[in-house]
Image (cartoon, grey):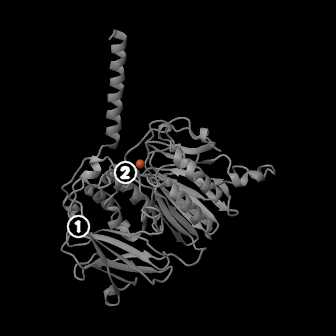
Amino acid sequence: MCTLHRTAAFLTSAVLAISLIASTSVSAQTAVTDRQRDKPSPDPDRIVLTWSADPSTTQSVTWRTDTTITSAVAQIVIASDGPKMADIARTDTAITERLDARNVPTKGTVSHFHSATFRDLRPDTLYAYRVGDGSRWSEWFHFRTASASKQKAFSFLYLGDAQNDILSLYSRVVREGFRHAPDMRFIIHAGDLVNDANSDWQWGEWFHAGGFIHAMVPSIPAAGNHEYRAASAAEAEAKTSSLSVYWKPQFTLPRNGVAGLEESNYWLDYENARIIVLNSNRDRESQTAWLREVLRDNPQAWTIATFHHPVFSAATERDNVALREAWKPVLEEFGVDLVLQGHDHTYARGRSDITGPTVNNVATGVNTRANATGPVYVVSVSGGKMYDAKPGGWDRFQATIERKTENTQLFQVIRVHGDTLRYEARTATGMLYDAFDLIRRDRLTNSFVERVPTDVEPRTMLSAPPYRRP
Ligand SMILES: [Fe+2]
């Protein structure tokens, strides 16, 4: 090798080494697998609310114990100001599921997951509930059922990947989100809740980070690529993967998706909004047909889709061509309002330059980007792992990034009130970073009102993000 080549080879390896150091230092997390609180006990822990049916009349709850608890119950009562709620609470029997994770490659333990779905609840009512075995109880938690009215305002939180540094860094984001929207009615998690699908200690971090928030505010989780890992030695040998062995035991979700993707592909209606969760890891074709059906028969004013891999990536080498070709035409044909995604560990928000249904109006001059829009696409990140936002944006996809940043943890608060949807993205410290309003015009288009604060940039930025107004 000549001197020049040797120098080039040295420089290449040095750059590689530096980039490896940089990437690991950003996302490093210490595996702590012997925490006492991760060991299941007779006391309920990892309590999480979800929905498996109508949010105005039902509420599902799931929790974990050790295997000594074989008969579990949940009590519910309309919340009162006096302390004697137990005297009049209704007791529902839970379903108990055994999870033996000792043989997954990441070596878990044996535990019992219990789930109950409270039914026949009154809409828009504050309930108190607790879970246990009849003598060992959790504390009483409050939740409010959805209103039966389609005009009552509500807020929810949307979070991108937690995935890395879940306990040390994601925790402050979900908690800050709760502080900013204490009355939020649910949390959309856009996939990669953990880094290793079957890692018990990482799920332990996720539950500890959310703490009582998970027991008070229902989660609507989407499955990311990191929720798919080999669940057995045979799968590891064959280099295949399957959905986290923890997913179904610990989340009680609607079973109205494509066969084989139950509880990772589903939809539910919350007041005047339809929330559609797609599993971007598997069986995309079947979900395309399913999505079309769910959108065709949709009486709700607002439609919000969430899945992990973004339609438009902010990074060129992470483009999801097949997903975009399969789902974008359907999302735009049926006027989905918001598409909430993760995976890219940056923040990007933007829109297609031209949406099919609005083309006819362009000639009249009425339909400009400012006052008519199809879906708004967002990628966000809540945990500690960060990727650089690559230059180039979405221009080659006939779409425009209107706000983007990197190296910043964020949470998003979305408020729906009748025909207005107000979107806000806030940084980990609570600073407003991005905002817009959508005002419903008809089934296919909304008026778009830009509300980006012009004078702020995250304090953690390594460089100023490119930014231009639409
Ligand atoms: Fe991902």
Q: Specify the quadrant that holds the N terminus.
A: top left
Q: Extreme right residue here?
A: 364
Determine if the C-beta at disc 1 is less than 8 A from ligand 1: no
**Would you identify the image quadrant in which residue 357 lies?**
bottom right
Which one is nearer the viewer's eye here, 106 or 344? Answer: 106
User: Residue 174: where, in percent of width, then height?
Assistant: 40, 58
How far apart in space, not on screen, are marks 1 and 2 (Cα)? 22 Å
Q: Does 341 sit left or right of 42 as displayed?
A: right
The amino acid type of the residue labelled 1 equals Ser
Q: Extreme bottom residue here?
A: 88
Which residue is label 2 attached to? Answer: 226
Which one is nearer the viewer's eye here, 101 or 79? Answer: 101
Determine whether the residue tagged by mark 1 lies in a helix, strand or loop.
strand
Determine if the C-beta at disc 2 is less than 8 A from ligand 1: yes
Determine whether the residue tagged by mark 2 lies in a helix, strand or loop.
helix
Q: Identify the residue shown where x is 44% and y is 50%.
A: 381
Q: Identify the residue shown where x is 30% and y is 70%.
A: 63
Q: Specify the quadrant that holds the C terminus.
A: top right
User: Residue 164: where, in percent of width, then height?
Assistant: 34, 49
The amino acid type of the residue labelled 2 equals His
